[in-house]
Image (cartoon, grey):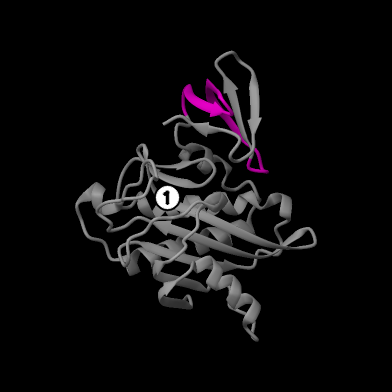
Amino acid sequence: MFNIIRLRETVSTNNYLRELLVSSREQLSEGMVVSADYQTKGRGQVGNVWESEDGENLLFSMLLFPSSIEANQQFVLSKMVSLAVAGVLKEEIDDVFIKWPNDIYWRNKKIAGILIENDLCGSNIQYCVIGIGLNVNQESFVSNAPNPVSLRQITGKTYDREDLLKRIVKRIYMLYIQLLREELNCFDEDYKTALYRHDGLHEYRANDEIFKASIEDVLPSGHLVLQTEKGTQRTFAFKEVSIVL
């Protein structure tokens, strides 16, 4: 169903797919996937490096053309993709959550990361490159990332990466079709329910301040609305606030 380009090694699957968009003489098909065994410079959010042992994990990017979605609505794609990845993982393990805005957590540890890069044409999205790194069979991590975990570490099982790839891609596309057919808020409740520490008061850090708050809302823009224990509401953009783990 999906055109999957399989690479032994690349700088990053997002970079490869974006370069393919520029160099290809023909229109690339929506849903095209680039998957690699190893990335020499895999990227996470805000330039962070994504650690992945050669041939052990899932590293791929997927192409969509959501031209009906406006630039100021693009966070809905982040909700869609994070729900898709979390949904497939929930078929394998319990205690899966989305750590705002789109990290995938098992309990207090990060099992997957998502990097979405949108190219705009006027006020709408011309194309969307969805990059996903999922820790599958890696048994140990050596980088300074604070809390990585893999499926194998959780269950002791070895997983078929190709099977997981196809299931996640299929789930993303299924939710994408739902998004195009329904309202932009169609994922709001599922996303809020899936959020890591969505209930109760928890510690957050903003600049040098640590405070207790509960999640009140996530705005269509992606901004996180917290209600402090003192009853005041505070709104944050990505990287302006972090959960104290």
Amino acid bearing label 1: Ala
> x and y percent of residue 121 in the render?
76, 65
Residue 24, quarter of the rendered image: bottom right
Q: Nearer the viewer, residue 172 or 35?
A: 35
* Highlighted range, magenta: 199-222
Work out whether 28 lies above or below 216: below
Work out whether 202 lies above or below 135: above
For disc 1, the marked residue is 86
Q: Nearer the viewer, residue 194 or 24?
A: 24
Dot 1, crowdedness within 10 Å: few (<14), some or many (≥20)? Answer: many
Q: Is residue 220 magenta?
A: yes
The mark total stands at 1
Say which residue appears at 40% left-offset and 43% top-offset.
105
Furthest residue toward top:
230
Say which residue appears at 48% left-offset and 24% top-offset.
203
Circle 1 — which element? helix
Work out whether 229 lies above or below 199: above
Say which residue appears at 75% left-offset and 60% top-offset.
124
Furthest residue toward left:
156
- Say whether residue 125 is left or right of residue 37: right
Q: Nearer the viewer, residue 33 or 117?
A: 117
